[in-house]
Amino acid sequence: SAAGMRFPLALCLGLVALATANQSPLQRRVVKEVLEYFHGRSNVHFLFKEQAVEGAVERVNPSGIFVQLRVSLVQTACRKRASQRHNCRALENRRKPTCLACYKFDSGDVPKVLDKYQNCGPSHHLAVKEIKQRDEAECRAVEEAGRAADTLYLPGMFAFSRGLPA
């Protein structure tokens, strides 16, 4: 019935709204990688933590799994080099950068990263049309990763097997 068809969609949308507990393992992994990437930048001196994860997309295709999400970060009172990291107070009035991340994983038991793209900046900066377009293009390229290998491999194999004497 039509009502039955509508229910799973509502369910999916509801899941997106729930916090980090319901993120898939790959999404959690991307969030962790984004934080490492952000803290790896030389101009970042404080510890940041995720405030929100939005727009999470996870698509499975023959060449692997594509994950895209936006992570809103918030600065904490801890220095980046601090050894105590678990009870760092968030500073609400400080800068809150946003990171866009696109990752392509292979479909192994322990998925490996085939390609990735990350861009962090003030959220108003990421909303600028040119930057948005570049981010979208980069993410499309990441999603295509691993696919070329399939298409290049098969025709060559076919031609090779055809060339052998019967």
Image: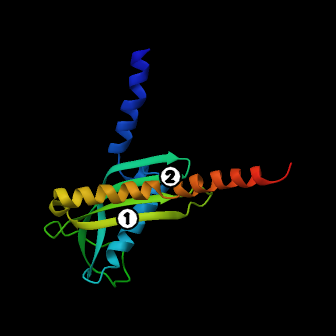
Q: What amino acid is labelled 2 in the image? A: Ile
Q: Which mark is residue 43?
A: none
In the displayed structure, 111 sits above or below 62; it is below
Q: Position of residue 147 (x, y in %)?
A: 53, 54
The answer to whether mark 1 and mark 2 are in CB contact below 8 A is no
Q: Is residue 26 left or right of residue 49?
A: right
Q: Position of residue 45 (x, y in %)?
A: 26, 82
**3D distance between C-alphas at marks 1 and 2:** 14 Å
Q: Position of residue 149 (x, y in %)?
A: 57, 58
Q: Which of 57/157 is in front? A: 157
* Residue where numbered disc 1 is placed: 117
Query: Looking at this rendering, what residue extends furthest in the right direction?
Result: 166
Coloring basis for residues: rainbow
Q: Image point 20% across, 66% down: which residue?
A: 96
Q: Which of 117/161 is in front? A: 161
Q: Quadrant of the N terminus?
A: top left
Q: Image point 65% across, 55% down: which residue?
A: 156
Q: Position of residue 110 (x, y in %)?
A: 60, 61
Q: Image point 75% across, 49% down: which residue?
A: 162
Q: Image point 55% across, 52% down: which residue?
A: 63
Q: Which mark is residue 65?
A: 2
In the displayed structure, 142 sits above or below 94; it is above
Q: What amino acid is labelled 1 in the image? A: Tyr
Quarter-of-image position of residue 48: bottom left
Asked whether residue 52 appears in the rendered view, the answer is no
